[in-house]
Image (cartoon, rainbow, N blue to C red):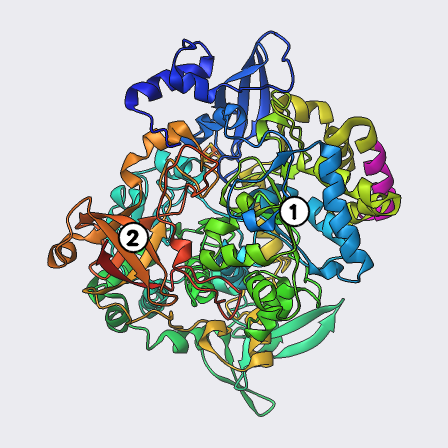
Amino acid sequence: MNTPLSRRDFIKAAGLAGLTVAASSPTLRLLRPSQPQTELQAEQEKIVPNICMMCPAACQILVRVKDGKIVKIEGNPKGPTNLGKICARGQAGLFRVYNPDRLKKPLLRDNPAQRGTFQGFREASWDQAFEAVASQVKKLISEGRVKEIFMLGGWPTCLYLEPYMKAFADTIGTPNAIGIPGGACYFPKAFGWSTALGVGAHSQILTDYENVKYLIVIRRNFFGSLSVVHGTRAGRKLGNYKLVVVDPRFSETAAKADVWIPIKPGTDLAFLLALIHVVIKEGLYDAEFLRKFTNAPMLVAEDGSPLTAGTEGGKTKYLVWDLAQGKPVKHEEAILPALEGEYNLDGKKVKPVFQLLKEKVEAYTPEWAESITGVPAATIRSIGIEFGKTRPAAVDTGWHDPKYKNSVMTWRAAAILNALVGGLVKDGILITGAGSIATPPPDVSEESVMRIWGTKQGVAMASKGFTFQGFLDAILNGDPYKVSMLFMFSTNIALTGPDATKWREAMKKLEKVVAIDIYPVDAVLYADIVLPESTFLERDDPLYAIAYAPALGFQTRVAAVQPVYDTKHLVDIIVGILRKLGDDYYTKFWVNLAKALGAADPNAMAAKLKDAYEKNGVRGIRAVQASARNLDPAKLESDGLIVLKDSSTLRKEMINKALAGQLLTPTGRIEIFSFALNNIKAKKGYQPYWDPIVAWAEPEVLGKADGRQTFYLTYGRVPTMTHTSTADEPLLSVLTPDYKRMAWINRKVAESLGIKKGDKIKLVSIANGVSVEAVAFPTDLVREDTIWVSSDFGHTSEALHYTKFGVPYHFLTSVKADPVAGGVMSQEVIVKVEKA
Ligand code: SF4
């Protein structure tokens, strides 16, 4: 059933938030829970804190409940992430609870031939469902095949419940678990930043939008995507800073910018290298900052090895050339460390890192960059000079970016440019609270498919397990070994996995597929066992670090209402399965969970967690976590959060840490010479993708689009939709009509191809031959060699009724990994355009 809502329906539906619309409205019938599991008690109005889960931005919200029903969602004014604001998607969150398309009871199906449809399911009790899962797991354990189990999470698992999934996997004994593959999301960007700063995920570093005076934004659209979090901060200061947006398409952020630079896709690195060239050439860098905060003065020999004076207290002491004393000394003992020149040390020629950087970027002139990026040299030069002369200036920290083979080096170049003007730690970019308490990603097991596949592909960071693409080879070809059972935790891999057609084929080949989700999205249709999860508004949650805010603190969710249907919290689902496996597994889980949560004494913590959970469920787990951090559980439940440090405290702390050499990099300083990349070079030989300083590294697609028949494919979010999290939202569908399957194509190009606005077109991937349908939107606001599509929000599931699509571009990408971080290279795609 396809149920488009008219604007009039939308207004009616909006009134439904107060549950006051006449019952005769067809819209109302759709949105009212048809068979509530629990008869809700009439009660006074209450306001309950929670964390929005309509996108990964984790805004703090307050949920207004009247007579046992949610009537409104508002921003939590105490929330440091979103400053009391929420977006349309956040407002629409309450429909997630009352959406009749939800999964309402556990479902079982015996005939794998029905995978891919919503046919053949029968309702089951939770006991039956747990038994069905446990019996397959027991079978695989008894046959010595437990590592054939693969657990895959979506972003809700990654952001919130990954430790629980990992503890579950560890307990049953499979090495194959990943809570959203970072290589599909943020890891290449995060690793690029971390080569300079030690941290780099979007929960760890944040542009200082309050104070920045010059801001360059690449590969990001913060006014049009996850807009509340950083867009609010950037938006309220618009006019106080110069905004330069580098984007092949005129995005919502470009629309608010002072300068829009329609760059050739994948070449931002060349643009940044030329800016570094200009800043150095014009002498606009902050030499004092480089001397004090970075390893720019560190001496490096001709063979690329840094010079040291041994170790003290386990820390290597690096040598610099002290101009004041005219000799090499330990960095911290130097009065005036040299940044430039060449010195002779024990017969070796040595140079400071900054000198090497200067020599490296000598060739990266604006004219050189113009030939690659299509941006006029004069524009690049003038931006470089303005950026270098303005303080604080910053290149924005970005968010998601697995797009090109050179993503890691691109973000490293952004970090170096920020460092040159003193914009890291001191001003411009702030290391946030979440960064300070985050632990680096652990290595995955040597046996895991992720690691083996990543290693075979030559991915330098394969040990981190961010390459999940290999599971396709494992399922389809048994390489490196067979994977036969899949657990999906809130992930719609059948729509958003790279080369999604192959994922659909692969899921049909598995022995058993278990889906844990709220909706019967595309991937759920491939399951044999469906375990319905409670929505974020129906559940109490454990303790989480506050994310994406210039603050350090903790937050949680408090259930606004009881589950409307027969659904459970993910933690209760995991525990239910483990109980069926037996007491040993159940007991072992709490130890593994304590380890995953970082407990110093896992056994002691495990006993507390188990006891608290048995008495109070997930609330009990939260209480144990809170007590371990000396947080008041009552305050957490009333406010939803506790802020421990604000941005100015964090700023001071980070400055002191950087000065004391205590950042999370190998040297403890900002690294203009990256030890992480130098280690990769030592193991794998030199490639520009892991140059220890910085270098031009080509994207695979460069020069492969002619702008007549072939085009670079780019994609982005739209303000009212998020991935598949908003797959089945009636109100948001009304707000998003113009983006439905829209493909931006340059107006002149469209004319030459005889394509008019609204024409159906096919985008055909050169790499895998797959095509998807789109609707042409000819415009001058996109480059002639570029097609832009709205991201693949929506669904193709027959079990959902509010059908709204972006263009499912994941069908067009192929399963390849970038050579450093294992990113899926989602924009290394050339498409042909044909009339449908
Ligand atoms: S940006 Fe909007 S959808 Fe995302 S968490 Fe915040 S309020 Fe929710």
Under mark 2, the amino acid is Trp
* 417 over 547 or under it: above or below: below
The percent position of residue 5, horizontal first and vertical second, equals 33, 26
Q: From which residue to which does the magenta span run?
A: 599-611
Per the image, label 2 sits on a secondary structure element best described as strand
Under mark 1, the amino acid is Glu
Q: Circle 1: is it few (<14), some (14-19), or many (20+) Cα within 10 Å?
A: many
Q: CA distance from mark 2 to mark 1?
A: 33 Å
Front residue of 719/570: it is 570
Residue 543 in magenta? Answer: no
* 27 over 352 or under it: above or below: above
**Residue 162 shows which numbered tag?**
1
> Which residue is at 34% across, 18% downward?
11
Residue 606 in magenta? Answer: yes
> Which residue is at 36% across, 29% downward?
3
Main secondary structure along the magenta-highlighted residues: helix
Residue matched to label 2: 788
Examine the image and state in which quarter residue 357 appears.
bottom left
| Res. 652 visible in picture | yes
- In this view, the residue farthest toward the bottom is 347
Disc with the residue nearer the chain's start (2 vs 1): 1
Does mark 1 have its CB less than 8 Å from ligand 1?
Answer: no
| Res. 333 visible in picture | no
The percent position of residue 150, horizontal first and vertical second, equals 66, 56
Marks 2 & 1, CB-CB < 8 Å contact: no
Examine the image and state in which quarter residue 173 appears.
bottom right
